[in-house]
């Protein structure tokens, strides 16, 4: 017979959230993600880093096919570092937020050239790499190296504010939330604990209609005891917009696009390259360039890969 999370917590008489309870839940209910090491496996820092960069501001569902294609094309960080940026951007096309792809390429070069192809293991050194903010650096340190680091994203913020019923409003509450999350982080299995917090926020402690009865921390959750878990986290009201009256002068602009066809094998001018028409849709063009191509009768829109979700948000899991 299997007891619910509520029954287990009450049986133990838990009053404070314990890492051991969350880890026990994680061992039974962890999500099977393509970049996540299996139980007993050693995490690959390259795969952890690649997934964390892709997951910034993007959902798991949208990232999965891109992650698979990147690993197939660049199975090792040395191959990614040696690639042309244009090839990286092409493979990234459609995932959005292209600065991530540029930082990905730049970071790969730094890791190969300065660290011999091995990711640094300390939080301070990771934070110095291109494209790695405090969250991503902490996630890699914890998940890849089991370092004592606590990554805090939107999912974790939601879990912590409900757990302690913090009334402070976001974003001002972020330092307090981080401190509380760090106080819960155990000395062992820090990588599993970080992923357990992420999974708890993504599958149980959801923004709407959280499944509190299944939560391993429900007996220790202040918001659950109050019955208002869904109202957390508190968020500062957005200031009302002010009415502005401006005068704009419009100037008509004309754009003339010339389309030329060149024989196969023709060398492109220095600093440029020719692109076959069937490959245009896969390129990471800025919006203005896409309009130019459209005016020339070329469809520049990339096809949505299977499983792509157009949704974007502040929490990526």
Image: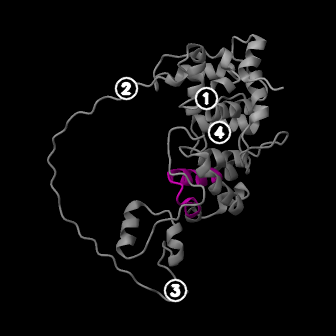
What separation in Å lies between label 1 and label 3 (alpha carbons)?
Answer: 58 Å
Residue 168: give x, y in percent of width and height.
Answer: 47, 18
Under tag 1, what secondary structure? loop
Q: Nearer the viewer, mark 2 or mark 4?
A: 2
Image point (50%, 45%), residue name: 312
Residue positioned most to the front: 1
Question: In the rendered image, which residue does mark 4 sit on?
Answer: 126
Is residue 184 rendered to the left or right of residue 258? Answer: right
Is 6 placed above or below 264 here? above
Q: Residue 279 is drawn in which quadrant? A: bottom right
Under tag 2, what secondary structure? loop
> Of the residues under marks 2 and 4, which one precedes in the sequence?
4
The numbered dot on residue 205 is 1
Classify mark 1: residues with Cα within 10 Å, few (<14), some (14-19) or many (20+): many
> Of the residues under marks 2 and 1, which one precedes in the sequence?
1
> Of the residues under marks 2 and 3, which one precedes in the sequence?
2
The numbered dot on residue 237 is 2
Q: Mark yes or no: residue 147 visible.
A: no
Question: In the rendered image, which residue does mark 3 sit on?
Answer: 266
Image point (49%, 23%), residue name: 231
What separation in Å lies between label 4 and label 1 (alpha carbons)?
Answer: 29 Å
Classify mark 2: residues with Cα within 10 Å, few (<14), some (14-19) or many (20+): few
Image: magenta residue range = 89-109
What separation in Å lies between label 2 and label 4 (alpha carbons)?
Answer: 35 Å
What separation in Å lies between label 2 and label 3 (alpha carbons)?
Answer: 59 Å
**Are discs 4 and 3 less than 8 Å apart at CB?**
no
């Amino acid at each position: 017979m299997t007891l619910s999370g509520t029954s287990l917590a009450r049986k133990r008489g838990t009053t404070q959230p314990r890492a051991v309870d969350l880890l026990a839940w994680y061992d039974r209910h962890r999500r099977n993600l393509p970049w996540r090491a299996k139980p007993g496996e050693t995490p690959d820092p390259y795969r952890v880093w690649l997934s964390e960069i892709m997951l910034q501001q993007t959902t798991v569902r949208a990232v999965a096919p891109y992650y698979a294609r990147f690993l197939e094309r660049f199975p090792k960080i040395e191959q990614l570092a040696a690639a042309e940026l244009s090839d990286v951007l092409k493979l990234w096309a459609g995932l959005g937020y292209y600065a991530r792809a540029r930082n990905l390429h730049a970071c790969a070069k730094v890791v190969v050239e300065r660290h011999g192809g091995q990711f640094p293991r300390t939080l301070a050194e990771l934070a110095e790499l291109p494209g790695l903010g405090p969250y991503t650096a902490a996630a890699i340190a914890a998940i890849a190296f089991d370092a004592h680091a606590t990554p805090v994203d939107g999912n974790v913020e939601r879990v912590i504010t409900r757990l302690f019923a913090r009334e402070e409003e976001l974003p001002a509450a972020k330092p307090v939330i981080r401190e509380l999350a760090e106080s819960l982080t155990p000395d062992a299995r820090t990588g599993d604990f970080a992923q357990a917090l992420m999974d708890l926020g993504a599958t149980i402690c959801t923004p709407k209609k959280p499944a509190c009865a299944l939560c391993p921390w429900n007996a220790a959750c202040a918001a659950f005891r109050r019955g208002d878990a869904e109202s957390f986290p508190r968020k500062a009201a957005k200031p009302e917009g002010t009415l502005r009256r401006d005068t704009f002068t419009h100037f008509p602009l004309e754009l003339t696009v010339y389309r030329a066809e060149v024989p196969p094998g023709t060398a492109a001018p220095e600093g440029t390259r020719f692109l076959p028409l069937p490959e245009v849709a896969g390129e990471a063009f800025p919006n203005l360039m896409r309009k130019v191509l459209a005016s020339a009768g070329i469809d520049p829109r990339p096809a949505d890969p299977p499983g792509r979700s157009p949704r974007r948000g502040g929490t990526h899991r």
